[in-house]
Image (spheres, helix red, strand yellow):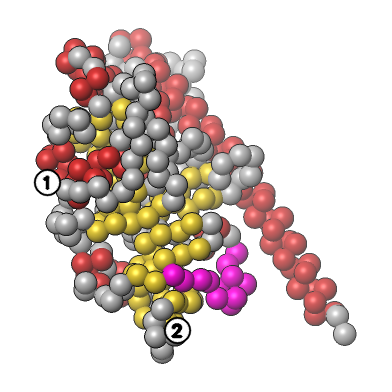
Amino acid sequence: MELTELGLDGVLAEQATCGSGRQLARVTAVDRGRYVVRNEQGEVPAELTGKFLHAATSSVDMPCVGDWVCVQYHDAESHASIHDVVPRRSFLRRKSPGKNIDFQMIAANIDVAFIVQSCHFDFNVRRLERYLVMVNEGHIEPVLLLTKTDLVSAAELEHMLANIRAAGIAARIITLSNVTGEGVEQVREVMLPGRTYCLLGSSGVGKTTLINQLSGHDALETRPVSGTGEGRHTTTRRHLVVLDNGALLIDMPGMRELGILTVGEGIDDSFADIKALATRCRFADCSHTNEPGCAIRKAIESGELNPEHYRSYLKLKAESDFNEMSYVDKRKKDKAFGKMVKTVLKQKP
């Protein structure tokens, strides 16, 4: 395959300045600190150099699936060392699970993110909003996939679609069933050769089954649904696969936690309707509580703005602001500790 067929475009090619003896490759899998990279000849395992690890100052600096990296091949190109990461054109990241206030890189250089929810057990508009904030912050086009339509009635499906639009979500929606095959062709038509897509969603919503449908064969292992119709967790690592039509698709494990961190731009893009309403308030610094001439309160009272949608906006914004303050404080402490270590090392005889 040519590198352009693996997703290398002009912008990324210009930013890729690998040194002598090094080549450009794409990270296709990450599993507990182990990497797989792919170039024109194929895939090989790879590891980070000591110099790279020493220079990395945060988790954001570490390679993730979809990254373009500068590598050096060894032993008849049977394995490689990763020396550098090419600046990302787009990215997916979230707050690290648990109490740790830090970023977790999920994937990079993605053109379209398919946000997948099951119509049966998984449907949740508030979670959709969280995914959209994450996707918009990373400069990725979102497309919503509602799966398992064969398990709900037409009226139930219409109600779900209405709830999505009532939340101000304008992204394209594709409804599909992996059982009947309805909607799968629409997904296939969206996917173009040389462009990179990813599947985001909870465990058991049919992501892996959809990949097998798109590829035309059982490329990935799936597990049968439970007796209630709920899916089961299948994918255990993030990896990039090349479909028969030349499109590139990243599958990844379901996410239990969707914490957000420093996503001001993503929130503004995801809640563009609220941002537009706020510009109509009488006062520029309106807090949307008791001020006269507040367009937000007026829209809620008239039914123009869904109050649950607005509460979700406030919650996500407060969470992002709090995590951002905590992250900045953590980074200051990390830098102070690093300076102390360097000072001690310089003083050591």
Chain part drawn in magenta: 45-57
* Image location of residue 112, percent across then percent down: 26, 48
Q: Residue at x 75, y 62 (%)?
A: 337
Q: Which residue is mark 2?
A: 74
1 or 2: tag closer to the N-terminus: 2
At x 15%, y 29%, the residue is 180
Give percent across and percent down for residue 89: 34, 61
| Circle 2 SS class | strand
Question: Which amino acid, mark 1?
Answer: Glu
Q: Is 131 located above or below residue 53 in the figure?
A: above
Q: Position of residue 245 (x, y in %)?
A: 14, 56
Residue drawn at (19%, 17%) of the image: 158
Q: Secondary structure at mark 1?
A: helix
Q: Which residue is labeled 1 in the image?
A: 189
Say left or right for 291 vs 151. right
Residue 64, percent across and down? 44, 59
Q: Is residue 115 visible?
A: no
Location of the C terminus by quadrant is bottom right
Q: Nearer the viewer, mark 1 or mark 2?
A: 2
- At label 2, counting other C-alpha atoms closer than 10 Å, the crowd grade (few under 14, some 14-19, many 20 or more) is few
Q: Is residue 48 magenta?
A: yes
Asked whether the residues under the numbered discs 1 and 2 touch, taking CB atoms below 8 Å apart as contact, a structural biologist would say no
Q: Is residue 28 left or right of residue 214?
A: right
